[in-house]
Image (cartoon, rainbow, N blue to C red):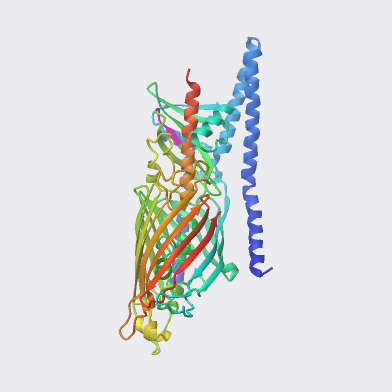
Amino acid sequence: MCSRRRSSLLAFLLLLAAGAGDAKVFLSVDEAVKLAFPGCEIAKRNAFLTPEQVRRARELSQGEVPSALITYYVAIRGGQPAGTAYFDTHRVRTLPETLMVVVDPQGRVGRIEVISFREPEEYMPRGPWYEQFRGKALGPDLQLKRDIRPVTGATLTARATTDAVRRVLALHRVLADGTKP
Amino acid sequence: MSSFWKGYVLMLVLALVLAAAAFGQSGSTEDRVRELEKQVEQLKAEVAAMKGGTPAGPAGEDRVAELERRLEVLAGEIEKLKIGEAAAAADQSDYGLGPAASKVYRTERGLSIGGYGELSYEHVGGETENHAAQGEDEEEAAPGDHLDVRRAVVYFGYKWNDRILLNSEVEYEHAGEEVSVEFAYLDFLWRPQLNLRAGLLLMPVGFLNELHEPTVFLGADRPEVETRILPTTWSEAGFGLFGNAGPFTYRGYVVNGLDARGFTDDGLRGGRQGGKEANAEDLAGVGRLDYTGVPGLLIGGSAYVGNGGQGIETPGGRKLSVGTRILEGHLEWRWKGLELRALGAQADLDDVAALNAALGLEGDESVGERLRGYYVQLGYDVLAGRGGGGNQGGAALIPFVRWESLNTQDAVPAGFQVNPDTDLDILTLGLAYKPIEQIVLKVDYQNLDNQAKTGADRFNVLLGYVF
C-alpha cells in the first residue's frame, strides 16, 4: 500500500475515533418506568416472598427464582391500575443483562425494554424480536421454539429473555394471589 | 508436554486468573446482596415482633416506623446491587459532563472470556462412486478413519467503557498444528445506526463466517459452499462501519484484498490473508445487509468487490489486477422447532488466463472464472419447547437434511479444460443433539457425487462446546 493511502487511512481512523465522543445511553430505572407509564402516578413497592410463594413462583415459571425480595413499580392512571414494571437481572453467556418487563392489568406482557446489556451487542436480538412477547400470558407455550421464535447467533439471549419473562409473570401472579382477600 | 499443550495450559491459567479478577467484583456483589437480604429478614422479624408485642404508645410506634424506614433503605440498596449501573438515577452528573454522558463513568469495565472447541471423528470411504480406489488428493481427506482436535478457540474481549471495546479470538487448529488470531478488532461505538470497527475483521459474508461456533450450525462439517466459494473462516485487516436501523443491520468494511496466488481450481480458500503480513497492494470493499423485521426470519445478502493481484506479474512483466467479485444471498426461517436455511453464492474473476500463466497452471488446473454454488438445509427440533427453565436449559434433538451443489470451475478461460472433480453435489443426512444449549453432538452421513465419479462418501461425528 502506498504511503499516501496509509496516511489517509490513519487520518480517517483518527477522525472517526475522535468523533465517537457521545456516550452510549443506558436507560436508568427511573427513565424506563417513565417511558412505560407516561402521565401515571408510580408507586415503588417491595415484596418479601414467603418460602411457599418462592416455591409457587418456581413451579409456575419452571425456572429459578433467585431472590425472595421483589421490587416492583405499580402505575396508576385516573385511579385505575395501568400496569406493573419489574426489573430482572440475569446472566446471558458470561455477563449480565437487565430487562424491564411490564405486566398489564390482565397479567399479560405489556412491554419489554433492555436496560443494560454487558455482552457484545451481536448477541442482542433486534427490536422486533422482543415484540413477540407483547400480549403473551404465562402458559406452557410461552417458551423458545413454541410461541417464541429463536434468533440465530443470539440463542442464549433469547433463552435468558424468555426465562426472565416467565419468571416475572409467575412472580406477578403469586403477588396478585397474595393480595386477594 | 508439547509446546501446544504448554501454550494452551498457560492460556487457560491466564484466562482463569483474569476471570477470577473480573468476577471478583460480581462475587462480592452477590455476597453483599445476601448479607443485606439477611439484614432485611432480621428487620422484618423485628418489625413483626414490635407490631405484635409492643404496647401501644408513641415510643413503640416510633420504633416500628424507624425499623420500617431501615427496611425500605436496605431493600433499595439490594435493588441497586442487583441491577447495577442502570439503577443510578439519570439526573446525576459526574465529572462535569451532562447526565447522559456521565453514565459512562458509572459503567463497570469488563473483561469477558469465552471460547469453543470441536473434536471430530471422520470416516472417509475407500471406494469411490466408480468403485475405484480413492486416489491421493492432498485437498481431500485420505480414506480411512480420522480423529482430530479440530479447533480449540479462546475468546477475549475487553470493554474499556461503553464506547470502546475489544473483541479477539485465538484459535488452535488440529491440536496446535496451526495457531492463528482469527479476529482482533476494536469497536468504537457511537450510536446504534453508526459505529466504527477496525482491526482484523471477519468478512461479513454468508451464515458461518461470523457465526461459526459448533452449536449454531447443523452438520459436523460446514457446507462446502461456505468453505470453497465463501472461504470460511475468512478474516482480513481493515476498518469499516456497522450498525442497525429498525429491522435492518449492516456492515461495510475496507480491507486488504484476497491474494490470487492462493487461488486454485478448488476455490478461493488459499487466497485468504488473515492479517499475516498481508499484501495490501490491492484493497477490497465488503458489505452486508440483513432484514430481521419478522421474528424468526433473516433475509439478506453480501458483496465483496476488490482486486486480488497483489503485485502478481505475468511472464511479460504486466501487473495483474485479478478483479474478484463475490455475491451471496441467504435466508433463514425459524418457526417453532423448524429451521430452514438457504444460501446461494457466485464469484467472478478477471484476468484468469493470465493468472494461470503466472501461476503455472495448465490443462484442467485453471482457476475458475466463475464459481457458483448453493445449499438448502431443513431441520426440526423434536424436543422443541420442552427445555424448561434456566438459561442453560433447552435440550434439542434435531434431525436434518442438507442438499448442496457447487462448481468451482463453472467457467474457465478459453484453452483450458474443466476438471470434473470440481462439479460437486452433496447430500447430508444427520442428527444434532444438544443436552444443553452450549454443547452439541453431531452425527451425519454425506453422499458426495461429482462429475468425475470420484466422490467418496463420509461418516462424521463431532463433539462441540462453547462457553
Counting from the top left corner in percent of width and height, residue B141 is at 49, 73
Reply above or below: B374 against A64.
below
The quarter of the rendered structure image containing the N terminus of chain A is bottom left
Q: Farthest residue in the right direction? A: B1
> As displayed, is residue B229 above or below residue B18?
below
Furthest residue in direction top, as rendered = B56
Instruction: Depth check: give the residue in front, B352 or B407.
Output: B407
Q: Nearer the viewer, residue B171 or B372?
A: B372
Is residue B329 covered in magenta?
Answer: no
Residue B352, image x, y percentages = 35, 80
Q: Position of residue A16 (x, y in %)?
A: 44, 58
- Which residue is at a point 34% across and 80% down the rendered structure image? B418
Q: Residue at x 43, y 79 (%)?
A: B132
Along the viewing direction, whichever of B334 and B445 lies nearer the viewer: B445
Name the residue at the bottom extreme. Answer: B316
Magenta segment's dominant SS is strand
Q: How many marks?
A: 0
Q: Is residue A46 visible?
A: yes
Q: Left or right: A13 with respect to B169?
A: left
User: Can residue B319 be seen in the rendering of this structure?
Assistant: no
Q: Which residues are magenta?
A: A101-105
* Farthest left residue in view: B414
Along the viewing direction, whichever of B238 and B83 lies nearer the viewer: B83
Q: Position of residue A45 (x, y in %)?
A: 51, 26
Query: Is residue A103 rendered magenta in the image?
Result: yes
Name the residue at 50% across, 48% down.
Answer: B395
Task: Judge left or right: residue B42 versus residue B384.
Answer: right
User: Dividing the picture into quarters, in which one does residue A33 lie?
Assistant: top left
